[in-house]
Image: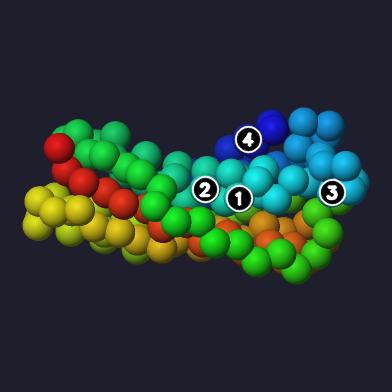
Amino acid sequence: MGVRPMEVTETHCRVALPYRWRSQNPFKSIYFAAQCAAGEMASGLIALQDLRKRPPCSMLVVRVEAEFYKKADRKLVFTCADGALIRQTIDQTFETRSAQTVRALSVGTLPDGTEAVKVWVTWSFKAK
């Protein structure tokens, strides 16, 4: 699909999803599944960055929800700004030694700034 990280910090992440033949459906827009995958990557990279500094922990997608507002017929940039919430959930995982979940939002925008899609990914974390 060509999803590429643009920026990853403790608080947010931005990834780009190009409009090309690998991500395009027969209706001349980006496949819904590619959009969901980009939303997953935007939130997942924040978690992975945090987990690199910690003991082993399982990370699993347990739910994906999406709302589509505009036809994605150009490059999309997905932004997840739930870094603090994700980090707090990972902290709780290690403090309680029990599985914790977090619902993270990634917003996909067109080059002109128009919101095209919102993707909510519910992550489960469990310390090993």
Q: Earlier in the sequence, mark 2 or mark 3?
A: 3
Judging depth in this view, the residue of 95 and 121 nearest the camera is 121
Residue underneath mark 4: 4
State the image quarter where residue 119 is shown. Answer: bottom right
**Label 2–label 1 contact, CB within 8 A:** yes
Residue underneath mark 1: 36
Tell me the quadrant of the picture where the N terminus can be found.
Answer: top right
**Label 1–label 4 contact, CB within 8 A:** no
Q: Earlier in the sequence, mark 4 or mark 2?
A: 4
- The reply, left or right, for residue 12 in relation to residue 62 is right
> How far apart are labels 4 and 2 at the CA level?
12 Å
Task: Judge the density around disc 2: few (<14), some (14-19), many (≥20) Cα neighbours within 10 Å.
Answer: many
Judging depth in this view, the residue of 114 and 119 nearest the camera is 119
Residue 26: image x %, image y %?
88, 42
Residue in view at x 70 percent, y 50 percent: 32
Residue 29's tag is: 3
Q: Earlier in the sequence, mark 1 or mark 4?
A: 4
Residue underneath mark 2: 40
Residue in view at x 90 percent, y 46 percent: 28
